[in-house]
Image: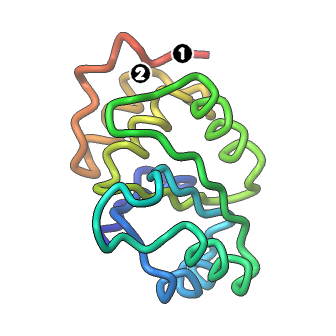
C-alpha cells in the first residue's frame, strides 16, 4: 500500500489488502472507499474480501467503481456524500491513488479553491493541474 495523505480528511492509496483494514480502522479512518472495479487487474483483492474485513473492523465500506480516466457524475456525487457524511478522515484506494485524488478534486466535498486542491495533491505527489478548469468551486 502506498498511502498518501492529501489533507486531514483524505488519504488515498494504491490497492489495499484485507489484512490492512484493521490498521486503518485503528488509525481513525471513518470510512474506506474503493474506486476500482473488481477484476481490473489480475490478483487484485476482491471487493467482497475488503468489505468483509471492513465489517469485521466496524468501518463503513463504499464501493464506487469507475474505470481510470472516467469520472461519471453519479460517482462524483456518491464520493462527495461519503466524504461529507463520514464524520472524520476517509481512506480511498484504487490502482495507484490517482483516480481517488482526481475524484475527490472533481467532487470537491469541502468547497476548496482549485488552487488549494491542486497544491495539496501536488504535495502528495499527484499533478492535478491539467484538470484545474474542471474543479468546481463552491
Tell me which residue sits at (33%, 63%) in the image. 14
Sooner in the amino-acid sequence: mark 1 or mark 2? 2
Q: In which quadrant of the rendered view does residue 90 lie?
A: bottom right
Q: Nearer the viewer, residue 105 or 34?
A: 34
* Residue tagged 1: 137
Tell me which residue sits at (35%, 41%) in the image. 120
Q: Is residue 120 left or right of residue 74?
A: left
Q: Is residue 64 above or below residue 127?
A: below
Q: Position of residue 31 (x, y in %)?
A: 66, 63
Q: Which mark is residue 114?
A: 2
Q: Position of residue 49 (x, y in %)?
A: 56, 78
Residue count near mark 2 (Cα–Cα under 10 Å), binned few <14, some 14–19, many ≥20: many
Q: How many numbered circles does the render carry?
A: 2
The kind of secondary structure element at disc 2 is helix
Quarter containing the C terminus: top right
Q: Nearer the viewer, residue 76 or 50?
A: 50
The kind of secondary structure element at disc 1 is loop
Q: Is residue 93 left or right of residue 25?
A: left
Q: Position of residue 40 (x, y in %)?
A: 35, 55
Q: Is residue 108 left or right of residue 81?
A: left
Quarter containing the N terminus: bottom left
Tell me which residue sits at (73%, 54%) in the image. 86
Tell me which residue sits at (61%, 59%) in the image. 89
Q: Nearer the viewer, residue 105 or 95?
A: 95
Q: Is residue 55 left or right of residue 110?
A: right
Check the image and tell me how it is coloured: rainbow
Q: Are marks 1 and 2 in contact (CB under 8 Å)?
A: yes
Amino acid at each position: 500500500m502506498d498511502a498518501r495523505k492529501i489533507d486531514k480528511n483524505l488519504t488515498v492509496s494504491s490497492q489495499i489488502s484485507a489484512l490492512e483494514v484493521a490498521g486503518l480502522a485503528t488509525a481513525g479512518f471513518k470510512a474506506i472507499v474503493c474506486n476500482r472495479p473488481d477484476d481490473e487487474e489480475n490478483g487484485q483483492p476482491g471487493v467482497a474480501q475488503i468489505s468483509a474485513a471492513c465489517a469485521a473492523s466496524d468501518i463503513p465500506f463504499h464501493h464506487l467503481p469507475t474505470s481510470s480516466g472516467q469520472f461519471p457524475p453519479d460517482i462524483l456525487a456518491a464520493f462527495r456524500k461519503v466524504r461529507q457524511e463520514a464524520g472524520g478522515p476517509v481512506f480511498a484506494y484504487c490502482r495507484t491513488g490517482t483516480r481517488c485524488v482526481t475524484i475527490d478534486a472533481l467532487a470537491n466535498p469541502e468547497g476548496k479553491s482549485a488552487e488549494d486542491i491542486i497544491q495539496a495533491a501536488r504535495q502528495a505527489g499527484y499533478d492535478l493541474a491539467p484538470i484545474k478548469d474542471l474543479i468546481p468551486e463552491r
